[in-house]
Image: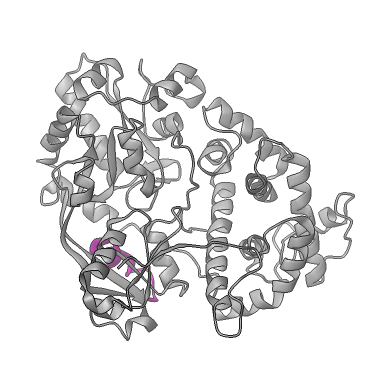
Amino acid sequence: MAIFRLTQIFPILSMLLLMALLCGCGRSESIPDTAEEQPPTMVERVSRSWTADLEETLEKRRFLRVLVTYNQTNFFIDQGTPRGIEYDYLKRYEDFLNRQRGKKALRVKMVFQVMPFDQLIPALLDGRGDIIAAGLTITSERSQRIAFTRPYIEDVSEIVVSTKAAGDTLASVDDLAGRRVHVLAGSSYAAHLRQLNRTSPGRLFRAIRVIEADPHLEEEDLLQLVNAGIFESTVVDAHIAEVWANVLDNIAVYPNIAVNSEGDIAWAVRKGNPQLLASLNDFLNKHRQGTFAGNMLIKRYYENTRWIRNPLTDTERDRFESLQDLFQKYGGQYGFDWLKLAALAYQESRLNQDAKSHRGAVGIMQLLPRTAAGPNIRIPDISSVENNIHAGVKYLAYLRDTYFDDPRLTPEVRTDFAIAAYNAGPARIKSMRGRAAALGLDPDVWFNQVEFATRKFVGREPVQYVSNIYAYYIAYRTAYRVMAQKPGTNGDDGNGHEFLRESRNR
């Protein structure tokens, strides 16, 4: 099932050579063809801080590290094949450099490194990447820290997108006063909304409530959460809003309500790399928006979208509320966040006790009766809702405590591995930790580490499975907070969740 792609905050040694492999780094003296062939020194070379300019980099390293975010327009993996406008652009730049170097020279490669949006600039400045290619808007604040190329997409408006119901009361930016607007963490959207708060005297007491979302979420994720009715509104670039409006039925796009206009999107490098900047600009002269090549790429990727089901439709919200006490009861008994258990159950069965898989798994938790009746669980009858949930949660705890009882793992990561094992089997997921270490990844972290080894050696299903559950978990906990803040409640879900960082700068 296609859902938002969520990433975990991680030390920015992301997938490194695995991404180099995925991104078509063919056999050469610099970068071997398979991840298994990567010597440790290669991992160190890619991850080591490096700030030299283009000429020295090409002479001594023969690869450039491209910092990207993972989403369905910029950079993503489709059935093992890397795609996205930034990927295609930078692979063309790779060809451009190699043509300049001549046929006898060793080939230069692009190594793509994925990370959360708010970590891109710090990683570049620290020398952990050479180019940011992530739909970055040129702003005066950013220009003080990094050097932008010439724009490859120009005249961009940052516009409001809301649910259709909320949109009935929106006519201008002024109507955002007092409303919550969820935006990409570290984005120009947040900066421009805060600037509106500071420059509009009328918002002294009713400022726009600017909420920077969880850094795991991308623009497309926020649009899908608005579509689901979980968030009321967001702000994104107009070209992103317009393409997603074609597939999300419950969003209203307001091109006339812009928090910023005439923006430019560009790549970025360090200020101390004028050679690289000049080379990228030379390339963009024939590849930016308005050229044949640039227009082709823009059209290709701003029509390529994916979207998720809403885990909080009226029917499923009713199911959720009817099962809440049971998830809380067994979550408390076995040491799990009950909202995460609800998310797992939604992924398994849509919270439907009548669900039955072709393999014989039954009920809300989609457990095999023989597994539930076995010596590790000992719940022989899972036909009732309570027994089914109890058995599923007990089995999840068994996986966590038996296969991932490693003192190096945090409690949250142990749960991540247990959830993956719930789908793909414990022995298989446990073995992926060793595979991840062999790839130069962190065997003690699931997201963006062991999950990439799992994608490579097992397949996409368990990776998407865990990501789906994390997405639904964020949706549930956010919605639960909203419900808990209604009159007559105490505004707390009992777990002390801090769901979002809210800023009311004026």
Residue at 13% x, 37% y is: 281
Image point (34%, 53%), residue name? 186
Residue 169 at x, y = what percent?
31, 85
Would you place residue 67 above or below residue 291 in this image?
above
Q: Quadrant of residue 49?
A: top left
As for residue 243 lying within the magenta part, the answer is: yes
Location of the C terminus (image quadrant): bottom left
Viewer can see residue 39: no
Q: Is residue 337 above or below residue 461?
A: below
Examine the structure image and report whether residue 316 is included in the region drawn in magenta: no
Total tally of numbered discs in the picture: 0
| Residue 100 drawn at (x, y percent) | 14, 23
Residue in front for this viewpoint, 479 or 4: 479
Residue depicted at x 75% and y 58%: 393
Seen from the viewer's position, the closer of residues 319 and 11 is 11
- Residue 422 relative to residue 61: left or right: right
Q: How is the image coloured?
A: one colour
Q: Residue at x 21, y 70 (%)?
A: 258
Query: Is 97 placed left or right of 211 in the picture?
Result: left
What segment carries the magenta color?
A: 238-251
x and y percentages locating residue 95 in the rendered image: 22, 30
Visible residue check, residue 265: yes
Place of residue 43 in the rendered image (x, y in percent of width and height, measured from the top left): 45, 23
Above or below: residue 428 compared with residue 187? above
- The residue lying toward the viewer, choosing from 187 and 380, is 187
